[in-house]
Image: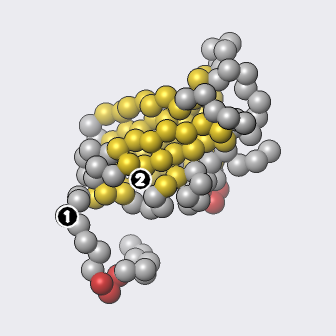
Amino acid sequence: GACPFDSRNEYFKKPFGAVRRGESVAFKLRLSVFVPNPRVFLVVANAYGETRSTLPDGYENVYGVSVTLEETGLYWYYFQVEQEDGHVFTIKKGPHHLGSYQADAPLYQLTCYGEDFETPDFLKGGLLYQ
């Protein structure tokens, strides 16, 4: 089936990459398996706790929600799908940043930086390895 999520594709997550505190981040999930009347959630966690946002009923199995991060630092996120029969499955980070239905897959990571941060000119458009 089609990929449910790709963190490096702006169709699924916009903006691309790290986000500024207070900036809205739009997420879309495309269920590639048929689930009748699912309840779909985006779960976002940081050092201070976890929030679950409901993704409203989708058109053609696409669900979307926007969240705003209020704290700087690292966040981790994944999607959770609850079926009518109570069964729950997750969509986490698979190979090549694509969504995976493997329960033990790692979580996606998202960095939130302060609104006063500016990228130094010599780094703009470049890659930094650590």
| Label tally | 2
18 vs 23: above or below: below
Task: Decide which of 66, 105 is in the foreground and name it.
Answer: 66
121 vs 73: above or below: below
Expressed as whole percent of the image width and height from the top left, the position of residue 118 reads 25, 72
- Residue named by callout 2: 110
Amino acid residing under circle 1:
Asp
Task: Decide which of 2, 68 is in the foreground and name it.
Answer: 68
At x 76%, y 48%, the residue is 2
Task: First in sequence, mark 2 or 1: give its number.
Answer: 2
Q: Find the distance from the CA under tag 2 to the CA under tag 1.
A: 18 Å
At x 48%, y 61%, the residue is 16
The quarter of the image holding the C terminus is bottom left
Task: Decide which of 103, 72 is in the foreground and name it.
Answer: 72
Expressed as whole percent of the image width and height from the top left, the position of residue 27 reads 51, 45
Relative placement, left or right, of 94 versus 52 is right
Q: Circle 1 sits in a helix, a strand or a loop, which is it?
A: loop
- Residue named by callout 1: 116
